């Protein structure tokens, strides 16, 4: 794209709506940084699970240990790696033992404040696309472009099931569906930064759309915004 002023793009929405894949593509097109904020909550969950030998979450212990959580991203040719205290945890954070606990941990206000502070720092120079649940509402309420992705839960579960089948996480479709329903509920009902559409976000229902369709809709909206500034 021509030399436009850099902006912040916030993509929020329900699990498995394609937020991260689209954010990654947009970041390539715009030459922007992409941060998947969900991967930060996942890395923090892995850290928290390791604090207890029985893999239980202990909120008090987690709050006391927040300053020991160091999260870094490294861009490689076909994507991005995430490091927790210098360890590459990119695959482990996608496994069911983390996925099934992350929304419980994401309810803890102290942890959210800790991660939101890091997320805001990533966006200091703009030119960033961040995806998550509270990016347009809490992390970057000033973002120039905001999207909110929704979709039928069964369509989303199928998508996630097929995605995982190609990796080594072998959960049944029913398990994936149950886990998504559970996470949606925890994310929407929590008191601290619940999953909610920002007033000025563009809502897209992805149920009957391909990733390309969603990308194209977002891209035309972003182009319009960029041409106005
Ligand atoms: O990729 P997927 O849609 O499965 O989820 P994710 O983006 O990796 O996020 C995992 C979980 O982290 C969510 O279900 C939320 O509980 C939490 N999360 C959050 O609370 N706030 C964010 N900004 C991002 C994720």
Image (spheres, rainbow, N blue to C red):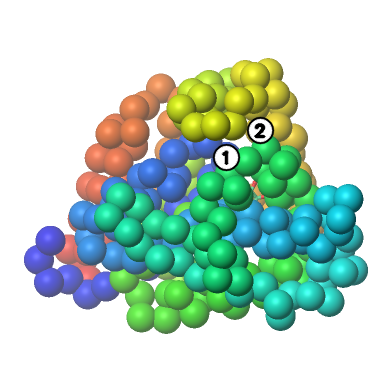
Please determine whether, in this image, residue 145 is positioned above or below residue 163. Answer: below
- Neighbor class of circle 1 (other Cα within 10 Å; few <14, some 14-19, many 20+) is many
Tell me: is circle 1 under 8 Å from ligand 1. Answer: yes
Q: Is residue 220 left or right of residue 18?
A: left
Q: Residue at x 53, y 47 (%)?
A: 91
Identify whether 101 is placed above or below 4: above
Given contact means CB atoms under 8 Å apart, are the residues at marks 1 and 2 in contact? yes
Which residue matches tag 2? 180
Residue 227 visible? The answer is yes
Q: Quadrant of residue 146?
A: bottom left
Q: How many marks?
A: 2
For image coordinates 90% across by 68% down, the residue present is 60
- Residue 213, given in percent of the width and then of the height, sits at 29, 32
> Quadrant of the image for the C terminus?
bottom left
Is 166 placed left or right of 107 in the picture?
left
Residue 196 appears anywhere in the view: no
Q: Quadrant of residue 52?
A: bottom right
At horizontal 49% and vertical 79% (from top left) the residue drawn is 121
Residue 212 is left or right of residue 209, and the answer is left
Q: Residue at x 40, y 66 (%)?
A: 74
Label 2 C-beta lies within 8 Å of the nearest ligand 1 atom = yes
Determine which residue is flagged by label 1. 15
Q: CA–CA distance between discs 1 and 2? A: 7 Å
């Amino acid at each position: 794209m021509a030399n436009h002023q850099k902006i912040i793009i916030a993509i929020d929405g329900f699990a498995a709506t394609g937020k991260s894949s689209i954010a990654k593509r947009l970041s390539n097109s715009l030459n922007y940084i992409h941060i998947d904020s969900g991967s930060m909550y996942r890395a923090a969950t892995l850290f928290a699970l390791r604090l207890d030998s029985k893999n239980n979450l202990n909120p008090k212990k987690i709050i006391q240990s927040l300053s020991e959580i160091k999260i870094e991203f490294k861009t490689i040719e076909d994507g991005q790696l995430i490091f927790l205290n210098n360890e590459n945890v990119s695959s482990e954070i996608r496994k069911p033992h983390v996925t099934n606990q992350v929304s419980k941990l994401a309810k803890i206000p102290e942890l959210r404040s800790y991660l939101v502070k890091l997320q805001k720092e990533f966006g200091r120079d703009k030119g960033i696309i961040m995806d998550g649940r509270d990016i347009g509402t809490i992390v970057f309420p000033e973002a120039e472009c905001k999207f909110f992705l929704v979709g039928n839960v069964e369509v989303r579960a199928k998508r996630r099931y097929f995605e995982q089948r190609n990796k080594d996480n072998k959960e049944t479709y029913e398990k994936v569906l149950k886990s998504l329903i559970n996470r949606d509920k925890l994310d929407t009902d929590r008191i601290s930064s619940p999953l909610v559409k920002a007033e000025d976000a563009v809502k897209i229902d992805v149920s009957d759309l391909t990733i390309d369709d969603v990308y194209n809709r977002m891209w035309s909206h972003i182009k319009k915004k960029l041409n106005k500034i």
